[in-house]
Image (cartoon, rainbow, N blue to C red):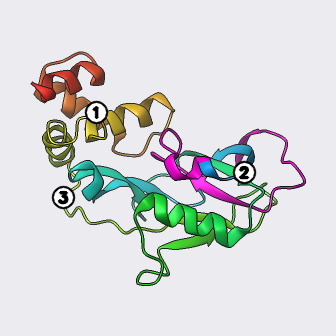
Amino acid sequence: MVLTRVPEPKRAACGILAFGSLIWEPRELETLNKVGEVICMTPWPVEFARSSRSRHWAPTLVRFDQGTAVRARVFLYANDPETVRGTLARREGIDLRTHPNTIQQCEIEGVRVNPVWYTALGANIDDLRPACLARLAIASVKPCPERNGIRYLHMCVGLGISTALTAAYAAEVLRVSRCDSLEEAEQWAAK
């Protein structure tokens, strides 16, 4: 289901599905020739079910059968599809020679470009109770001040990305920190 459509330029060759930090931290993707974007929903459910090494083991969103479809974006590019796939892999720290199936294709209803790439990392958090997620997020703040779990959660909430666990996870971070906002909780965890 497409929520908002930005006209798809005829020169778009492919897209990237973004439903987490790709939206606010495109990094390497900024070297590509972006020609538009479409706001949509993920074609499958996602959840805060992956502990990310690059965020000091904080929870991040991945495809997860018991999750919820969330607001997402498809960034449209004029570059060759394999160039876009390779750039997405570099941004994600993935070596396609050893993990070729980690960047996959999906179809997004109403988006006419093909392929649309996404990062297909698996869930690796066994205990998805809000207390466990909050503990991982809080523990990530000091060692990873710029890319920590509380900031990741805060950015997702701010963009309207809401899974089945988002509200309870955020509430647990606020309960433990005794703060009124995720921004304050991040500052508390940094001390």
First in sequence, mark 1 or 2: give its number. Answer: 2
User: Disc 1 marks which residue?
Assistant: 170
Please tell me which of labels 3 and 2 falls first in the chain: 2
Q: Position of residue 95 (x, y in %)?
A: 43, 75
- Whether 118 is among the magenta residues is no
Q: Return the x and y of residue 72 as percentages of the image width and height.
A: 58, 46
Left/right placement of residue 106 relative to residue 67 reads right
**Disc 2 element:** loop
For discs 3 and 2, the disc positioned in front in the rendered view: 2
Assess whether residue 15 is covered by the magenta stretch: yes
**Amino acid of disc 1:** Ala
Label 3 Cα neighbours within 10 Å, binned few <14 / some 14-19 / many ≥20: few
Regarding mark 3 in the picture, which secondary structure is present there? loop
Please tell me the numbered disc located at residue 33.
2
**30 or 77: nearer the viewer:** 30
Q: Identify which residue, 69 or 144, lies in the foreground.
A: 144
- Residue lying furthest front in this view? 31
Residue located 45% across and 45% down the image: 21
Question: Could you tell whether 94 is left or right of 131 in the image?
Answer: right
> Mark 2 belongs to which amino acid?
Asn
In the image, 59 versus 165, the foreground residue is: 59
Q: As drawn, which residue projects farthest toward the top?
A: 180
Q: Residues within 10 Å of mark 1 (few under 14, many from 20)?
A: many
Q: In x, y percent, where is residue 151?
A: 32, 33
List the residue tagged with mark 3.
127
| Highlighted range, magenta | 1-30
Q: Which of the two residues, 191 or 40, is positioned nearer the viewer here?
A: 191
Q: Is 101 located above or below residue 67 in the figure? A: below
Q: Earlier in the sequence, mark 1 or mark 3?
A: 3
